[in-house]
């Protein structure tokens, strides 16, 4: 899917986890308008990566269901550090916002 085909709703549906969907909505709602295109471009890129991996993920799920183990040729790696690094700029942006009246 090309970037121009994405909408916030389609991005929301494409994300596999409720935490990532919530983060998308939070980013959209809390990002200054002038920064929104860059934020949405990042989410579109992530959604496109997920979409391109979907056939491999579905094949691995089917293999696991049938045989009880992941395929031998499946490359796996822990991407936790990548996810945390990629989320960091959004978290830092929230710190720059003014605080509400309390």
Image: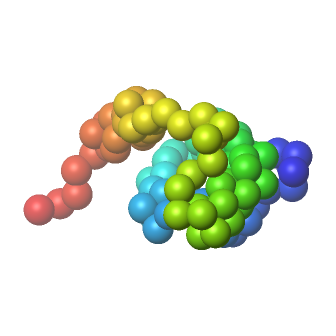
Vertical comparison of 76 with 102: above or below = above
- Choose between 58 and 99: the one closer to the eye: 58
The reply, left or right, for residue 99 in relation to residue 50 is left
- For the residue pair 37 and 21, the one nearer the viewer reads as 21
Asked where in the image residue 66 lies, by quadrant, the reply is bottom right
State the residue at coordinates (48%, 57%). 20
Q: Residue at x 53, y 56 (%)?
A: 69
Q: In the image, is residue 39 above or below residue 56? A: above
Residue furthest left in the image: 102
Closer-to-camera residue (63/56)? 63
Q: Which of 89 and 32 is in front in this view?
A: 89
Q: Is residue 32 left or right of residue 96?
A: right
Picture coordinates of residue 10 (x, y %)?
A: 73, 65
| Residue 101 appears anywhere in the view | yes
Compared to 22, does 49 lie above or below?
A: above
Quarter of the image for the C terminus: give it. bottom left
Q: Which residue is drawn at 43% across and 35% down?
A: 78
Q: Is residue 30 left or right of residue 70?
A: left
| Residue 96 position in % (x across, y down) | 31, 36
Picture coordinates of residue 64, whole percent (x, y): 58, 62
């Amino acid at each position: 899917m090309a970037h121009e085909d994405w909408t916030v709703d389609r991005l929301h549906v494409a994300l596999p986890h409720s935490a990532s969907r919530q983060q998308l909505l939070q980013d959209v709602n809390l990002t200054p308008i002038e920064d929104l295109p860059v934020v949405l471009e990042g989410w579109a890129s992530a959604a496109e990566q997920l979409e391109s991996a979907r056939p491999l993920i579905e094949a691995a799920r089917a293999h696991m269901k049938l045989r009880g183990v992941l395929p031998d040729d499946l490359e796996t790696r822990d991407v936790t550090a990548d996810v945390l690094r990629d989320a960091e700029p959004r978290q830092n942006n929230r710190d720059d916002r003014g605080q509400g009246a309390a």
